[in-house]
Structures are given as structure tokens and as C-alpha cells.
Amino acid sequence: MIERLTSTKIPAAVGSYSSASKVGNLIFTSGQLPINAETGKIDQPTSIEWQVEQSLKNIKAILEDNGSSMEAIIKTTVYLADIADFNSFNGVYQTFFQNGFPARTAFEVGNLPMGALVEIEAIAEVLS
């Protein structure tokens, strides 16, 4: 059985999709753009560091509101508008994980919605 998930702490979806889905003991998040839930915008359109942090905060909110956590992430997929931002991305990304890093795929894409520099999705285990 598939359960559709969301969080009141993240922005509304920019398309026809759920913020996340739960199947069994796993949560699959949709790609999270760096949209600030309070403004509905990408507040710092030229800062990769700010955008990575905001995307990960959105993932964290989804997971924590649905019985999981950043530490329960099994794998992430990262879409970068420019692979030259990879090192800057890594600098912020690593601060969100205290007990080792999940498996990850990262690559450059042509364009992201709303002119974003990054979009991140995750698969995590449900803890409760």
C-alpha cells in the first residue's frame, strides 16, 4: 500500500506530485527544490550554498514529520544545474549528516524548475 506524505513546513508542490510516498518501511521524497516555505520563492537565486541548505531543510522537514530523520537516509540523488558547484554543494551537504553519509548520485542537468541551482531527493527508512 502506498501512502502519500507531506509536511506543513515545506512549500507546496510546484506540479502534480506528492512531496513524498511511503511504501512499507521506506519514504521516497520527491526532488526538493530550494524553495523557502514562508516566501514560496528561491530567496537566494545565485547562492549554491544557500540553495543546498534549503533543499536539505525541506527534506529534513518531510522526514521528521513522517517518522524518519536525516540519519535514516539510505540514498540521495542530487541534480546540479552546474557540476562546477559540486565542491560547494559537498561543503554544505556534509554538515547535515553526523554518523556517516548515505549512498549518493550527483550529476549535472540542463535546467531545473524555477531556475534552481540544485534539486535533491532522498530514500529513507521509517524509524517509528
Image: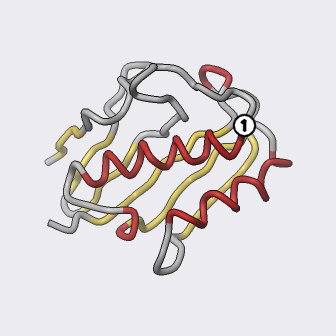
Say left or right for 114 vs 25.
right
Instruction: Give the percent coordinates (x, y) of residue 48.
Output: 71, 41
Could you say which quadrant of the image residue 69 lies in?
bottom left
Element at label 1 = loop
Query: Does 31 sit above or below residue 85?
Result: above
The type of residue carrying mark 1 is Ser
Instruction: Give the percent coordinates (x, y) of residue 120.
Output: 54, 46
Instruction: Report the residue that reaches farthest toward the bottom.
Output: 99
Residue at (19%, 59%) from the top-left corner? 24
Residue at (67%, 55%) from the top-left corner? 106
Could you say which quadrant of the image residue 47 lies in?
top right
Q: Nearer the viewer, residue 123 or 90?
A: 90
| Circle 1 residue | 47
Residue at (40%, 28%) from the top-left corner? 37
Count the numbered circles shown.
Answer: 1
Instruction: Give the percent coordinates (x, y) of residue 4.
Output: 21, 38
Instruction: Give the percent coordinates (x, y) of residue 105.
Output: 63, 59
Applied colour scheme: secondary structure
Query: Does 101 sit above or below residue 119?
Result: below
Residue at (79%, 59%) from the top-left corner? 87
Q: Nearer the viewer, residue 56 or 110?
A: 56
Q: Dot 1: few (<14), some (14–19), or many (≥20) neighbours within 10 Å?
A: some
Say left or right for 84 vs 128.
right
The quadrant of the image that shows the C terminus is bottom left
Say left or right for 55 vs 38.
right
